[in-house]
Amino acid sequence: MPDWIPDVLGDEFEQLTLELADDDEGQVVATLVRALPGRSRWWERLTRERGALEDVDVLYIHGWSDYFFQKRLARFWTSRGARFFALDLRKYGRSLRDGQTPGYITDLAAYDEDIAAALQAMGRGDEGAESGRRLILLGHSTGGLTLSLWASRHPGAADAVVLNSPWLEFQVASARPLIAPVAELQARWAPREVAPQVDLGFYTRAQQEVSDPDDPVEVNLLWRPAQTMAVHAGWFHAILSGHARVAAGLSVDAPVCVLLSARSATPTRWSEDLTRADSVLVVDDIARAALKLGPSVTVERIDGALHDVFLSRHEAREEAYRRLDRWVRGWSAVRERQT
């Protein structure tokens, strides 16, 4: 296996290339990024200010047309003692190779190979459970859908699941059963057919409008373009199939925390309202779909949040971190009482 090398994020971040099976476009890899906690100081050990998550590994997966770049999100976990890992899936971000179709896949279950390789590199075995350390899965948008499906197929592997605006349902939920058969035919006969571009770049603009100079975020526009990557028929069918499985009910046996904006906004034209709402998903439908993930689901609705709640304007972003901290503290306390 290749060695860990310095990551493009600099500072405490390193990356590891994970070799996967080739496909019809040639070599396929995923990339694991890690940030490890620093050694706690003696007074932190005495006061238990750190260490509540010292036996925790966090595995993050990004959304569609995205990659991992959120330093502060990683530091939220490492400052509490956890080891943080983020996976750039095949054909995204650090893992995209020349000649590949960005983000293209025809079955979300194919990412099992990426996740298994990441868990192996984390020292957990390819099923995630061969370790004395607890595992928290953390997913944004499409990554949240992918991890929800994975956790349901791998009972006992995760100890907790945290989802940041997971894409659990199609934007027009009532139309999904009507669209799905057409999407299946397109995926079968012309899987690489490209849908018209409907993203006007307003979500990217909203993030730029609310950016905080005291909490800077740098984005590589080659890996996360202002308008989303091309949507292919095969990929779209894979997403709808995932939504159908969620609608039928999953069996995630770990506690789940879902973080969502309080409101949605339709991005047909630019307005300031887009800087205070989720302009990608219909959050009320996502909240309802979240209840079908498993028996223990907490839904946190955050006023003024964007689609990525951790990239929202200052007040909403800080509230998102407060809510996450509260949930993680409660989860960890319950786990301690059980052991």
Image (tube, rainbow, N blue to C red):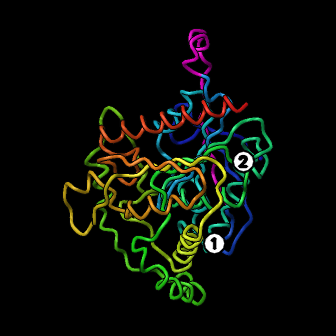
Residue identified by numbered label 1: 107
In percent of width and height, residue 184 lies at 56, 85
Give the number of the disc on residue 143.
none
- Check if residue 120 falls in the magenta segment: no
Residue 306 vs residue 323, the one in the foreground: 323
Q: How many marks overall?
A: 2
Q: Amino acid at mark 1?
A: Asp
Judged from the image, the secondary structure of the residue bearing numbered disc 2 is helix
In percent of width and height, residue 264 lies at 31, 60
In percent of width and height, residue 331 lies at 58, 36
Q: Amino acid at mark 2?
A: Leu
Task: Classify the position of the C terminus by image quarter.
Answer: top right
Q: Residue furthest left?
A: 271
Residue 252 vs residue 135, the one in the foreground: 252
Q: Is residue 150 left or right of residue 123?
A: left
Q: Quadrant of residue 335?
A: top right
Q: Is residue 184 left or right of residue 214?
A: right
Residue at (61, 74) in percent of width and height: 106
Residue identified by numbered label 2: 119
- Magenta range is 29-50
| Mark 1: few/some/many CA within 10 Å (<14, 14-19, 20+) | some
Estimate the spatial distance between the alpha carbons at disc 2 and disc 1, rounded to whole Å.
Answer: 20 Å
Judged from the image, the secondary structure of the residue bearing numbered disc 1 is loop
Residue at (61, 39) in percent of width and height: 34
- Which label's residue is closer to the chain start, 2 or 1? 1
| Above or below: residue 268 compared with residue 121 | below
Residue at (43, 38) in percent of width and height: 323
Tags 2 and 1 in contact by the CB under 8 Å rule? no
